[in-house]
Image: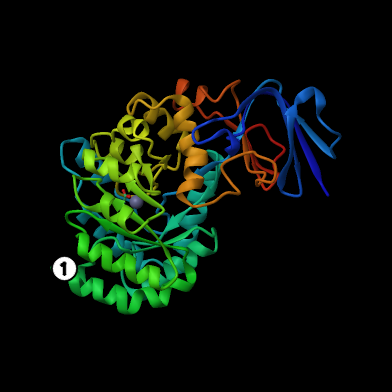
Amino acid sequence: MATTALTNIGTLVTNDPTLGEGALGVRHDAAVVFEDGVVAWVGDSADTPAADTGRDLDGRAVLPGFVESHSHLVFAGERAEEFAARMSGEKYAAGGIRTTIEATRAASDDQLAANVRRLLGESLRSGSTTVECKTGYGQSASDELRSAQIAGRFTDEVTLLAAHVPPPEYAGRADDYVAMVCDEMIAACAPHAKWIDVFCERGAFNREQARAVLTAGVEAGLIPRVHGNQLGEGPGVQLAVEMNAASVDHVTYVTPADVDALAGGSTVATLLPGADFSTRNKYPDARALLDAGVTVALGADCNPGTCYTTSLPFCIAIAVRELHMTPAEAVWAATAGGARALQREDVGSLRIGARADAIGLDAPSYLHLAYRPGVPLIREVFKDGTLIASSVGGAA
Ligand SMILES: N=CN[C@@H](CCC(=O)O)C(=O)O
Ligand SMILES: [Zn+2]
């Protein structure tokens, strides 16, 4: 029964779920005690019970670890030139994904695993203690299978992005590709994944094709999530709600009917403003979604094409400045919101019984995540109650 107490916390964000959606459950001059990997006690610092080890936060802020619900880490190569061309006026097109498919197919398992390990380390040091990881750069039964297996070495949140774009050998034959996904790929990969995902967008897959992929995934025991409405208005959001998907991600171009559909369903809208930043896209209308009562999550969407960052603090800063989310809304969306998008109740909050996944900031309040953009504010990262990253030393 190893116990650790974090004391003298200036601002503690608990996301106590009993306070309702969006409530940060902030406490001041607070403390938390971790015991055997979970939160065992939360209260005033002055009342902290005895613990085996202690850490004095000296007035700094503590939050639940970020829950990153959208990332593409199994890939090889990079596309910096494509980014530079965009910054000179080129438009992002889904076809760029094929460049990464080619590089990923040519890479060894060890090279792909090393890339996942490197990016997960980066992600962890920027405060993400739960990270979902998609396949999607294999796009053949065997390459998707090895991508799912490699992702599964690092996280339980493996998403089979079976239909990202039709690969080169299926150029102009998206229906044939979807048939192969439904008849062959999903059966091979489902034992290694929790989620089924599809890119429902012009240049990728249409509504019927996307529905076929999600339906086959559900029949194989996977839970649906959707990439939709990133590059233009389209059927992605409505399909996600129709399929009772856990989340629809991007949601940059939505109609009032899309917002109503989300507000009337249980699908989370996961906003990925880093992708809109790096593609010089417009930003999603977070206010319309939040004001309609839609559950909003924030993800970083690390991938080599649209958004090569693992930093949720960066995305929080954009969400506040450009999407007009309040700092509290953005922090909730990157923690409890991400947990909702992954249908997880054990992460995203510091309620008693939750996983002891927490971050300490080099700042007195969560407000500083948006107030001090670009500054490495993540000072401590605790995973299952253990200090696993620290900018000031002492990590395991
Ligand atoms: N939009 C689709 N998939 C990725 C981008 C993939 C790429 O360009 O390599 C995304 O989530 O942004
Ligand atoms: Zn994505």
Task: Pick whichever, 126 or 20, lies toward us.
Answer: 20
Residue 109: image x %, image y %?
A: 46, 68
The reply, left or right, for residue 76 in relation to residue 92 is: right
The residue closer to the viewer here, 114 or 235, is 235
* Front residue of 39 and 382: 39
Residue 273 visible here = yes
The relative height of residue 105 versus residue 239 in the rendered view (above or below) is below
Residue at disc 1, secondary structure: loop
The image quadrant that residue 362 belongs to is top right
Coloring scheme of the render?
Answer: rainbow
Residue sitting at x 57%, y 22%? 365
Q: Residues within 10 Å of mark 1 (few under 14, many from 20)?
A: few
Which residue position is annotated with label 1?
Answer: 171
Three-letter code, disc 1: Ala
Quarter-of-image position of residue 358 = top right
On screen, residue 225 above or below 251: below
In the drawing, does residue 109 fall left or right of residue 303? Answer: right
Quarter of the picture holding the C terminus: top right
Q: Position of residue 40 (x, y in %)?
A: 75, 42
**Residue occupying the point 35% across, 38% down:** 274
Q: Residue at x 81, y 26 (%)?
A: 47
* Residue 339 pos. (x, y %): 51, 46
5, above or below 171, in the image: above
